Amino acid sequence: MKTFPNLVVMTTKFSSRISRYAASLFLIAVFILGNQTAMAAKRVEPPAPEKDQTIMLALLLDTSNSMDGLIDQAKSQLWKIVNELSAAKCGNGSKPKIKIALYEYGNDGLPSSEGYIRQVSGLTNDLDLISERLFALRTNGGSEFCGHVIRTSLNQLDWSTSNADLKMIFIAGNEPFTQGSVSYREACALAKEKGVIVNTIYCGDFNEGMNSNWKDGADIGGGSFMSIEQNSKTVYIPTPYDDRLSQLNDQLNKTYVYYGATGSRKKELQEVQDNNAASYGAANKAERAVSKSSSAYVNSTWDLVDASKENEEVISKAKDDELPSEMKGMSVEKRKAYVKEKSAERAKIQSEIQSVNKQRQEYISKNTPKEDKDKMLDAAMINAIKSKAKTKNLTWDN
């Protein structure tokens, strides 16, 4: 039998090349399949629940002459709004932090060089401070520059950079949205770029607000356009539970232990804001009592009970001459025991307030007249907040 050595060699080389080519194809296929599997796993992996979320609200109020009704609604509805915010839940079941800022604009008493704009308060969780500043607002006719005040609030406030936080501007007024040298379009576009939602509240007829560009501002800023009847009075439903909540509020105040250079004044301010709330009736004071029983009401800058939850060392470091008379001269151990006792008292009172308020809310639900509540400031804000909160995985039980 005749052999063909050259043919054998060629066949061997050809087979070797095919093997190497097949191996390369196999490795490429493994790489592609592995990469696709990793990408698929990345796509379907559920996001981890966010922690330490914050709801940030900047309220920009027109304080020109015609806005007395708007300011009155803001004063009388602050604690209703806070109570809605404090009922929110993060995706992991925790409570979001609440920060509120306040601006006034359109007031002749403000510098024209600043666009008739004033920062009343920066973003803060000091709700008594917001209440104090809100009650101090006075109206005075002027020019209302919406684009200017929006841009100012974006540049001045300490907005977070976290995509998990809900950041919103609410601007309320009744003049054309186009006034002033700062373009509202550019200001609202800047807000969207910063992740801040712009909601516009026109004080007057809905169609008039649309025609004067208030809706356009909200559309550009990714928010909601609403109209309210700013001269309507807040209607509270008196309940059989209001007096009990007032009593519990007074008991709650006794659990606050001031410290620091401004502690005594801040403690007095707390009672002043109780009285401001009560000026709108017992029902509104009840709303404030409920706020004070919630996680949104935090006073760690002047109250040892709240402060010690964040850092227990504050109890020992507090200066003796900046403490209440009953604590002066106490040893560190006695201080800690006293603060612990007040903390337990507060938790018990807050729990009872929540329980009584549940009965109160059931009573209000049954006795509230059927009317268009969406025409009030609080309802307009709450509806807009809840609508956008879904995008941040924030929820409410009701």
Image (cartoon, rainbow, N blue to C red):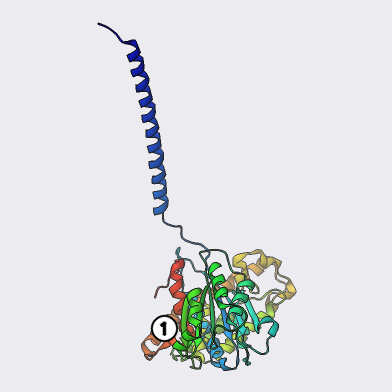
Split into 4 quadrants, where in the image is the N terminus? top left
- Total marks placed: 1
Q: Position of residue 57 (x, y in %)?
A: 55, 75
Residue extending farthest left? 1
Q: Identify the residue under disc 1.
A: 361
Image quadrant where residue 142 sits: bottom right
Quadrant in which the C terminus appears? bottom left
Task: Pick out the residue farthest to the right.
Answer: 321
Viewer-closest of 190 and 386: 190
| Image point (40%, 34%), residue name | 27
- How far across and down, in percent of the image, does residue 176 sit? 54, 86
Q: 42 or 269: nearer the eye?
A: 42
Q: What x and y, as percent, mark residue 366?
A: 36, 87
Q: Residue at x 36, y 15 (%)?
A: 9
Looking at this view, is 302 or 304 the one in front? 302
Whether residue 353 can be seen here:
no
Q: Residue at x 57, y 72 (%)?
A: 343
**223 left or right of 315?**
left
Task: State the image coordinates of residue 284 (x, y, percent, origin top left).
Answer: 51, 88
Quadrant location of residue 372?
bottom left
Above or below for 42 versus 183: above
Task: Bin the neighbour count of mark 1 within 10 Å (Cα to Cα): few under 14, some 14-19, many 20 and up.
Answer: some
Q: The residue under label 1 is which amino acid type?
A: Gln
Describe the element under mark 1 as helix, strand or loop. Answer: helix
Asked whether the viewer can see residue 358, the reply is yes
